[in-house]
Amino acid sequence: MAKIASISMRVNPRIKAEAESFYGSLGMTLTEAINIFLHKSILEGGLPFDVRQPRYNSKTEAAMREARDILAGKVPAESYDSASTMFTALNE
């Protein structure tokens, strides 16, 4: 019989619930998924996936900055009376 070792870790409760739901849909527990991750890490000799920040083109990065500024209230958001008015503005 294999020896059992415990790992205690803190995670965001929402992330934990989403992960449990996701892995449950695959027919496994979160513990089984973590064990698979650990085994794969050992086989790969590191993380079994690339860790990097997403890179976007300058136009996309500018749009993301603008969206953050709108959400933060730094820039007023455009508003339109109708969908046709909005599409006309987008086409200009």
Image (spheres, rainbow, N blue to C red):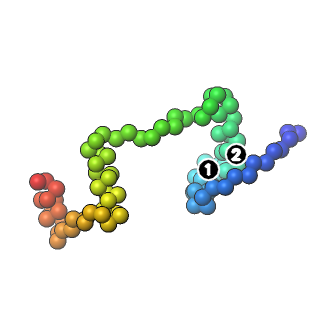
**The N terminus sits in image quarter:** top right
Residue 55 lies left or right of residue 79; in this view the side is right
Corner quadrant of residue 4: top right
- Residue type, numbered disc 1: Tyr
Residue 51 locus on image (x, y percent)? 52, 37
Residue 72 lies left or right of residue 8; in this view the side is left
Task: Identify the residue under disc 2.
Answer: 32
Q: Is residue 76 visible?
A: yes
- Residue type, numbered disc 2: Glu
Residue 42 locus on image (x, y percent)? 68, 31
**The C terminus sits in image quarter:** bottom left
Question: Dot 2: few (<14), some (14–19), or many (≥20) neighbours within 10 Å?
Answer: few
Corner quadrant of residue 57: top left
Is mark 2 in CB contact (under 8 Å) with mark 1?
yes
Q: Is residue 21 visible?
A: no
Question: Dot 1: few (<14), some (14–19), or many (≥20) neighbours within 10 Å?
Answer: some
Observer-nearest of 63 and 21: 63
- Residue at image location 67% in from the left, 55% down from the top: 10
Residue 23's label in the rendered image is: 1
Residue 52 locus on image (x, y percent)? 48, 38
